[in-house]
Amino acid sequence: MIKPSPNPPDTDPASPYEPYSKKLNEAAERALNFHFPSMADIKATPRTPNNLFTVDPEATTETLVVYLVETLASVDVMVHQLVDHLDGGSRNALLGISNSVMLAEITANRVLDQIDPPG
C-alpha cells in the first residue's frame, strides 16, 4: 500500500501566524512578568511590616513568656475539649498536637524559671 503523503508531511515553513508571533510572545512575556515577578524583583521590594498583629517592643521577656505559657495552656484546654468529640485517627492526631503543645508549655515554663527562679 502506498502512502499518499510523505512522512513527515511537507509543510510550508512560514507559519500563517508569523507576523503576529513576535507581538504575541512579547505580550505573553509582559503578562507573565506582571503576574509572576522574578525572585530578584521580590527580594528588591522593601519589606513593610504589618501592624495588625504586633507585640509591644517594650514588653519584657518575662511578660512575653508568661503570655506564651498562658496561650499554650489555653490551646491545650481547647484541644482536650475537641478530643472528647472525636474517634479514631482524628482523635489520635489531636492528642499528638496536644502533646506538642504540652511540651512547648513545659519548655516555656522552664525559660520562665530561668528568668525569675522560684524562691
Image (tube, grey):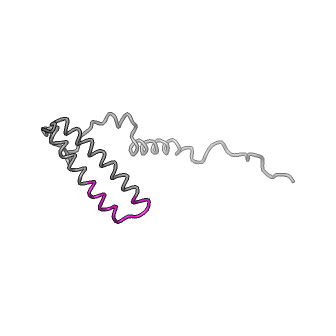
- Horizontal and vertical percent position of residue 67: 18, 46
Q: Residue at x 69, y 46 (%)?
A: 11
Count of numbered labels shown in the rendering: 0
Decide if residue 36 is on the left or right side of residue 105: right
Give yes or no for residue 80 being in the magenta stretch: yes
Q: Is residue 116 above or below residue 71?
A: above
Which residue is the extreme one toward the right?
1
- Horizontal and vertical percent position of residue 95: 36, 55
Decide if residue 45 is on the left or right side of residue 11: left
Find the magenta span and give its range: 75-91
Quadrant showing the C terminus: top left
Which sits in the foreground, 35 or 51?
A: 51
- Type of secondary structure dominating the magenta stretch: helix
State the image quarter where residue 112 is shown. top left
Quadrant showing the N terminus: bottom right
Q: Residue at x 51, y 41 (%)?
A: 22
Decide if residue 62 is on the left or right side of residue 83: left
